[in-house]
Image (spheres, grey):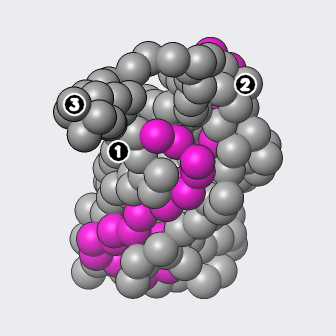
């Protein structure tokens, strides 16, 4: 009988919910957007995008590190710093800058290491392309402001021009490399 009583106590004790319960709380990371696509950018031109990091958990979210990794990581940089921690429901906006040094596709990752219960190491893909002939109203300025250039004509591939003076009428440029400083050209006509 004594053995049966000891056996019954040993079986029941692990199932007992006796004493205070320890509730563990954790930070939980969320990012928006989950990837950054910078699209087409001219080489040596910077473009900035933002990513929001939110603590969706019930405890502080502590950052261990925030870094850029991958073969093309030097083409990306952080434009703002991250805090050491985020309180529950707190949001921080981190800026990432893409400045391609060469033409072609670029890919890297933003690696966010934290104490988050859902993703202690969160990877955010970063992609962008650098093209010598990007036609984008946000990157190509109107030269007809009257204070340096009047008519840049039609540029298909700017190639590599280091200093050509101030553009008055460049006509139609088919392939001249990448333009760093248009400088002063009175009438280039059609360059092939």
Secondary structure of the residue carrying numbered label 1: loop
Q: Earlier in the sequence, mark 1 or mark 3?
A: 3
Residue 66 position in % (x across, y down): 62, 59
Point out the image quarter for the C terminus.
bottom left
**In this view, 154 is above or below 52:** below
Of residues 132 and 106, which is closer to you in this image? 106
Label ID, residue 112: none
Q: Give me the residue at 65% from left, 80% from top.
A: 163
Q: From where the camera sits, is residue 158 visible?
A: no
**In this view, 126 is above or below 88:** below
Q: Earlier in the sequence, mark 2 or mark 1?
A: 1
* Eye-nearest disc, 3 or 2: 3
User: Which image quadrant is residue 86 in?
Assistant: top right
Residue 49 position in % (x across, y down): 53, 41
Main SS, magenta residues: strand
Q: Which residue is mark 3?
A: 1
Going by the image, does 151 lie left or right of 172? right
**In this view, 133 is above or below 176:** above
Q: Give me the residue at 39% from left, 56% from top.
A: 123
Give, as a single range, the part of the protein colored magenta. Answer: 89-117
Q: Which residue is mark 2?
A: 87
**Residue 113 colored magenta?**
yes
Q: Which residue is mark 1?
A: 35
Q: Give me the residue at 29% from left, 34% from top.
A: 2
């Amino acid at each position: 009988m004594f053995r049966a009583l000891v056996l019954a106590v040993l079986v029941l004790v692990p199932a007992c919910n006796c004493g205070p319960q320890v509730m563990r709380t954790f930070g939980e990371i969320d990012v928006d957007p989950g990837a950054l696509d910078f699209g087409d950018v001219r080489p040596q031109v910077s473009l900035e995008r933002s990513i929001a990091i939110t603590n969706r958990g019930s405890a502080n979210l502590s950052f261990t590190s925030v870094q850029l990794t991958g073969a093309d990581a030097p083409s990306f940089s952080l434009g703002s710093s991250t805090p050491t921690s985020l309180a529950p429901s707190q949001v921080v906006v981190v800026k990432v800058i893409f400045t391609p040094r060469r033409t072609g596709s670029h890919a890297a990752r933003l690696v966010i290491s934290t104490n988050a219960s859902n993703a202690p190491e969160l990877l955010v893909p970063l992609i962008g392309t650098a093209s010598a002939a990007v036609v984008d109203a946000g990157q190509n300025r109107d030269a007809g402001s009257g204070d340096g250039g009047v008519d840049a004509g039609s540029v298909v591939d700017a190639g590599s021009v280091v200093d050509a003076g101030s553009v008055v009428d460049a006509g139609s440029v088919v392939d001249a490399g990448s333009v760093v400083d248009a400088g002063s050209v009175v009438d280039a006509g059609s360059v092939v």
